[in-house]
Amino acid sequence: MGVIHVTDRQGQRHTLECVEGWRVMEIIRDWGLPIEGVCGGACECATCHVFIAKDWVEKLDPATDEEEDQLDTVITHPTSRLSCQIIWTPDLDGLELTLAPANG
Amino acid sequence: MTDNIETDVVIIGAGPVGLFAVFELGLLDIKCHLIDILPKVGGQCAELYPEKPIYDIPGFPMVTGQGLVDNLLAQIEPFHPTFHFNEMVESVEPIGTPEAPLFRVRTAEDGTTFTCKAIIIAAGGGSFQPKKPPMENIEAYEGTGVFYAVRHMQMFRDKRVLIVGGGDSALDWTVNLQPIVKRLTLLHRRDAFRAAPHTVEKMRALVAGGDMDLHLGQVTHLKGKAPVLEGVEIKKDDGSIVSVDCDVVLPFFGLTMKLGPIANWGLNLHENLIPVDTEKFETNVPGVFAIGDINTYPGKLKLILSGFHEGALAAQKVHRYVYPDKKLLFQYTTSSTSLQKKLGVTA
Ligand SMILES: Cc1cc2nc3c(=O)[nH]c(=O)nc-3n(C[C@H](O)[C@H](O)[C@H](O)COP(=O)(O)OP(=O)(O)OC[C@H]3O[C@@H](n4cnc5c(N)ncnc54)[C@H](O)[C@@H]3O)c2cc1C
Ligand code: FES
């Protein structure tokens, strides 16, 4: 077991217990934070967009072309990722991220 | 002049579930018109994942999103449904009685009206609409300095235009508008474009020739006293800020689903979904049914196969409204010659 730290859109930080093999989007959604994940993790909606803390960026597998294409549909920061494309493993214990603003 | 179309049933949404409802209604001799804001059939399957494989459609070990839609179209062909694309259903007005419902349905664009005896809402996650990027105060410029679609190219003649995005819409409008605008700037977050290669080449040639500008970065905010746009500030990946003067911004960030006007039709809603019973999939308004992703009931699963089942049961009750005096006979397509005649498979 391990945790991730998620800062919501009001700036409040939540520490969430994780399940190995789950997508980070699914973990966030399961704990009831407002992440939409409309496409269920199929990399087709970008409603699971998050900003990864700088220190963690290098520790993640780089985004695939498909994820980059989908990131084109939102306003990104340099550390933007789609949380459905990050599978949680114990290596990511302590992962720190912030929910991106929702689209209008 | 607005037209009025009379039909048995109006189906709102031409996604997989709306399409299959045509089949179930057709077997019961019920005619229908389908309306969708998209320019094509297929809903999420066609718009969001046409190439992706689906593995849980009964009888298909694997079928792609578009493949399923194509098959559904072939399956409902015998019933000749009429499609109305690029039209948003704006209002639904009951003009009958609970025992003999009658409705007037109105669309937004050209104001076509429909008179029908029952309505099937198969609106999925809502109507597909352009994604609005989360920029502060963007609404204040909509219609003057910010547009999510190009309806009349002439509106942008001699203007300084900034297009944001890296997909087909962004690139197509870049090369189409460049010749008539005063100055065109394309802004994208990275130097890779997922648009047709020849359009990307054209854009690159224009940039190389000095006929337009390309910036890599993201808009941070809109400048000018709303509703008059004067420019934008762009943050580049290296953190530097540049300012671009422009009269118009066209953000092309793809489509998203929004509940839209359905919220105003007097239907009970629960978290943007329409509660229905599980016998007839009828809403709180007699004669209005909701099937597929848009409905909710205890145990609901947002699966295509659930939507198909819901359509079959809803059709039974619709039959009672359309043919109040006719008894409904349960028949199989394998053995009923009358059903086979409707399907055009017997001599
Ligand atoms: C990436 C992805 C993968 C999926 N994989 C599977 C899978 O493997 N198996 C499975 O069973 N399901 C899957 N789904 C879910 C499945 O696609 C949906 O359950 C299905 O599309 C729902 O069909 P529907 O006809 O109810 O609605 P939709 O497909 O959402 O279609 C609704 C249509 O209604 C239109 N509409 C809405 N309101 C209006 C209005 N007011 N006026 C005009 N038009 C309107 C919309 O524009 C849209 O075209 C997946 C979904 C996604 C996004
Ligand atoms: S949940 Fe849709 S892209 Fe991640």
Image (cartoon, rainbow, N blue to C red):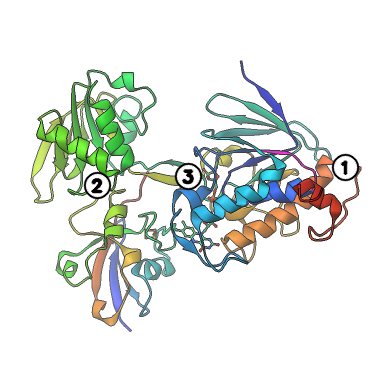
Q: CA distance from mark 1 to mark 2?
A: 57 Å
Q: Does residue B116 appear left or right of residue A45 in this picture?
A: right
Residue on which disc 3 sits: B258
Write down the chain letter for disc 3. B
Quadrant assignment, res B77? top right
Q: Position of residue B67 (x, y in %)?
A: 52, 55
Quadrant assignment, res A23? bottom left
Residue on which disc 2 sits: B193
Write down the chain letter for disc 1. B
* Local SS, label 1: loop
Q: Which residues are magenta?
A: B28-33
Residue displayed at 12% across by 46% down: B236
Label 1 CB less than 8 angstroms from ligand 1: no
Q: Does residue B131 appear left or right of residue B250 in this picture?
A: right
What's the magenta bit mostly, secondary-structure-wise? Answer: loop
Q: Are callouts 1 and 3 both on one chain?
A: yes
Label 2 CB less than 8 angstroms from ligand 2: no
Q: Does residue B271 appear left or right of residue B282 in this picture?
A: left
Q: CA distance from mark 3 to mark 2?
A: 27 Å
The local crowd at label 3, few if under 14, some if 14 to 19, many if 20 or more residues have their Cα within 10 Å, is some
Badge 1 vs badge 3, beta-carbon distance below 8 Å? no
Does residue B229 appear in the picture of this structure? yes
Q: Position of residue A10 (x, y in %)?
A: 31, 56
Nearest to the observer: residue B38 or residue B103: B38
